[in-house]
C-alpha cells in the first residue's frame, strides 16, 4: 500500500478575516426593519450571503449595506415615492424564489429619478450593487464603480469594489480600491476604518502569494486596533497572522497568534470565529506532532460547528479527525469519522470531499484485509474523480490526477495479491500513465517495478 491521501482542499478550511468598514452608526447590524415583508426579504438576502466564501468581516460589512438597501425601499413605499404594491411584490419575489431582479429594477427607477443629486444617486448604485453582490459579480462591480465615480468619498462602495475585484482576481484593482479606503479614512481621522483597509490589503497580498507583505499589513492593522482597543479587529488581524505563519511553517508564532485571537474571541463570544480557531489550532498541533492535543481541538471545533449548524465545516473537521485517527492506526475511530463526514457531504453534493473520504475508507478496509469493501470504495472514489472538472494544468488538476494514480495503483496491488494479473496490469498501467503526466519520479519507479514483477510472474 502507498499511504494516506493528501489532505483535501476545502474552502471552509481557512477562514480569512477581513476588516469591517462601517456603513452607518458603527454597528453593522444597526437598522431595525419593522416592515415584516422587508425584514423577511433582508433575512433571505442574508442567507444568500451566508452561502458565500466572503470573509467574516466582509459579510458583516455587506450586512449593513443590505439592511440599508431594504430599509430605503421600505421608506420609499411609506412616503409613496414608490408604490406599495411594487415594493411588496419585489420583497415577495426574494422571499419566495431568491429572485433579486424586481428589487434591482426598483433601484434602477430610483437611480433615474435622482440624477440631479450625485451623492444620493451614488448611494442608490451602492444599494443596487449590494443586492446583486452574491449573485452577479460583474453587475455589482459595475454599480460600485459608478457609485465611486459619482461620489469619490463613498468609502463603503470603494470597499465593496475591493472585495469584488478580489473575487475575480483583479488584484491590482483590489489593492487600489482598499488604498482609496485607507486614504479617505486617514483624511477623516477614522483609524478603525484605516486599519480595516490595511488588513484587507494584507488579504490581497496573501492571495497573490506575497506572504511577507501580507503579514506586515496584518501586523500594522493589529497595532492600530490595539491602540484603539478594538478587540474585533485585533482578533481578525491575529487570525490572519496565524494563517500566514502556518503557511510559512513558523509553528510557534502561528500558535501564539491563534491562541491570542482565541482568548479575545471567547471574550467577544463570536462562536463562528471560535470554531474556526479551534480547527486552525488543531491543524497546527497535528502537523507539530501533538496528536492528542489536536484531537481535543478538532472535537471542540466539531461541537461548535454543531451549535452553528455549519455543515461543510463540520464535515471537514470530521474528516481531519478521521485522518488523524488513521495515522494513529485507530481504524474504527477513523472509519466512524469518515462516515460522519460523508453523511453530511452526500446530501450537499460535496463531490471532491466525498471522493477523499471514500478513498481513505478504502485504505482502511485494505489495511484490515476487507478487500472487497476496499475495492468498492476505491471505485466509488474514482467514479467521482472521473467526473470532476478542473482548469487545465492547474494545481487542482495535478492533485486530482495524482490522487487517481494513487487509487489505481492500490487497486492494481490488490489484484496482484489476488493473483488476478490481467486486472492488476490494467490498473497499474493506468496509475503509471497518470504519474508520468504529473511527473512523480519515485511513484513512476515504484509502479514500473510492480509491472516488471507481473511480467516475471507471467513468464514463470
Image (tube, helix red, strand yellow):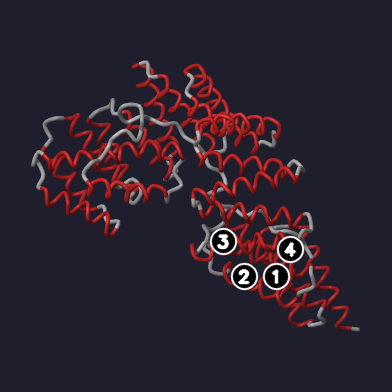
Nearest the eye: 319 or 208: 319
Q: Report if the CB atoms under discs 1 and 2 are less than 8 Å apart.
A: yes
Estimate the spatial distance between the alpha carbons at disc 1 and disc 2, rounded to whole Å. 8 Å
Label 1: element kind:
helix
User: How packed is label 3: few (under 14 Cα within 10 Å), some, or many (20 or more)?
Assistant: some
Name above or below for residue 70 compared with residue 416.
above
Classify residue 179 as left or right of residue 459: left
Among the two numbered marks 2 and 4 on one chain, the one whose residue lies closer to the N terminus: 4
Among the two numbered marks 1 and 2 on one chain, the one whose residue lies closer to the N terminus: 2
Among the two numbered marks 3 and 4 on one chain, the one whose residue lies closer to the N terminus: 4
Which residue is denoted by mark 1 in the rendering? 408
User: How packed is label 2: few (under 14 Cα within 10 Å), some, or many (20 or more)?
Assistant: many
Name the image quarter holding residue 453: bottom right
Task: Check the image and name the residue furthest to the right.
Answer: 460
Q: Nearer the viewer, mark 3 or mark 4?
A: 4
Which residue is denoted by mark 4 in the rendering? 332
Among the two numbered marks 1 and 3 on one chain, the one whose residue lies closer to the N terminus: 3
Amino acid at each position: 500500500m502507498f499511504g494516506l491521501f493528501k489532505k483535501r482542499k476545502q474552502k471552509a478550511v481557512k477562514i480569512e478575516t477581513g476588516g469591517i468598514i462601517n456603513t452607518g452608526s458603527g454597528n453593522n447590524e444597526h437598522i431595525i426593519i419593522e416592515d415584516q415583508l422587508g425584514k423577511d426579504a433582508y433575512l433571505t438576502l442574508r442567507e444568500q450571503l451566508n452561502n458565500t466564501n466572503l470573509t467574516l468581516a466582509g459579510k458583516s460589512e455587506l450586512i449593513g449595506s443590505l439592511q440599508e438597501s431594504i430599509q430605503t425601499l421600505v421608506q420609499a413605499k411609506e412616503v409613496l415615492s414608490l408604490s406599495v404594491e411594487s415594493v411588496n411584490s419585489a420583497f415577495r419575489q426574494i422571499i419566495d424564489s431568491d429572485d433579486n431582479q424586481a428589487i434591482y429594477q426598483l433601484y434602477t427607477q430610483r437611480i433615474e429619478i435622482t440624477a440631479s443629486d450625485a451623492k444620493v444617486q451614488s448611494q442608490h448604485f451602492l444599494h443596487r450593487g449590494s443586492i446583486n453582490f452574491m449573485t452577479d459579480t460583474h453587475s455589482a462591480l459595475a454599480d460600485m464603480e459608478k457609485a465611486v465615480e459619482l461620489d469619490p468619498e463613498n468609502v463603503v462602495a470603494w470597499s465593496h469594489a475591493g472585495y469584488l475585484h478580489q473575487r475575480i482576481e483583479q488584484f491590482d484593482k483590489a489593492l487600489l480600491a482598499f488604498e482609496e479606503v485607507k486614504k479617505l479614512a486617514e483624511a477623516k481621522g477614522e483609524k478603525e476604518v484605516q486599519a480595516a483597509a490595511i488588513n484587507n490589503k494584507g488579504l490581497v497580498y496573501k492571495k497573490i502569494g506575497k506572504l511577507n507583505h501580507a503579514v506586515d499589513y496584518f501586523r500594522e492593522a493589529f497595532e492600530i486596533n490595539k491602540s484603539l482597543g478594538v478587540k474585533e479587529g485585533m482578533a481578525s488581524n491575529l487570525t490572519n497572522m496565524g494563517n500566514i505563519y502556518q503557511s510559512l511553517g513558523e509553528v510557534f508564532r502561528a500558535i501564539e497568534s491563534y491562541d491570542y485571537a482565541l482568548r479575545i474571541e471567547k471574550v467577544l463570544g463570536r462562536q463562528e470565529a471560535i470554531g474556526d480557531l479551534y480547527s486552525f489550532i488543531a491543524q497546527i498541533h497535528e502537523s507539530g506532532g501533538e496528536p492528542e492535543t489536536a484531537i481535543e481541538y478538532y472535537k471542540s471545533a466539531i461541537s461548535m460547528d454543531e451549535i452553528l449548524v455549519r455543515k461543510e465545516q463540520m464535515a471537514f473537521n470530521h474528516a481531519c479527525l478521521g485522518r488523524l485517527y488513521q495515522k494513529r492506526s485507530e481504524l474504527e475511530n477513523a472509519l466512524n469519522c469518515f462516515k460522519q463526514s460523508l453523511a453530511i457531504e452526500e446530501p450537499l453534493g460535496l463531490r471532491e470531499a466525498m471522493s477523499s473520504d471514500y478513498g481513505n475508507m478504502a485504505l482502511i478496509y485494505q489495511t484490515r484485509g476487507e478487500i472487497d469493501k476496499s475495492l468498492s470504495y476505491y471505485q466509488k472514489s474514482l467514479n467521482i474523480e472521473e467526473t470532476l472538472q478542473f482548469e487545465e494544468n492547474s494545481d487542482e488538476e495535478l492533485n486530482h490526477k495524482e490522487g487517481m494514480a494513487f487509487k489505481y495503483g492500490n487497486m492494481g496491488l490488490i489484484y496482484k495479491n489476488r493473483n488476478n494479473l490481467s486486472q492488476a496490469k490494467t490498473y497499474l498501467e493506468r496509475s503509471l500513465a497518470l504519474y508520468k503526466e504529473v511527473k512523480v519520479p519515485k511513484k513512476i519507479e515504484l509502479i514500473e517495478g510492480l509491472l516488471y514483477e507481473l511480467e516475471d510472474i507471467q513468464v514463470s
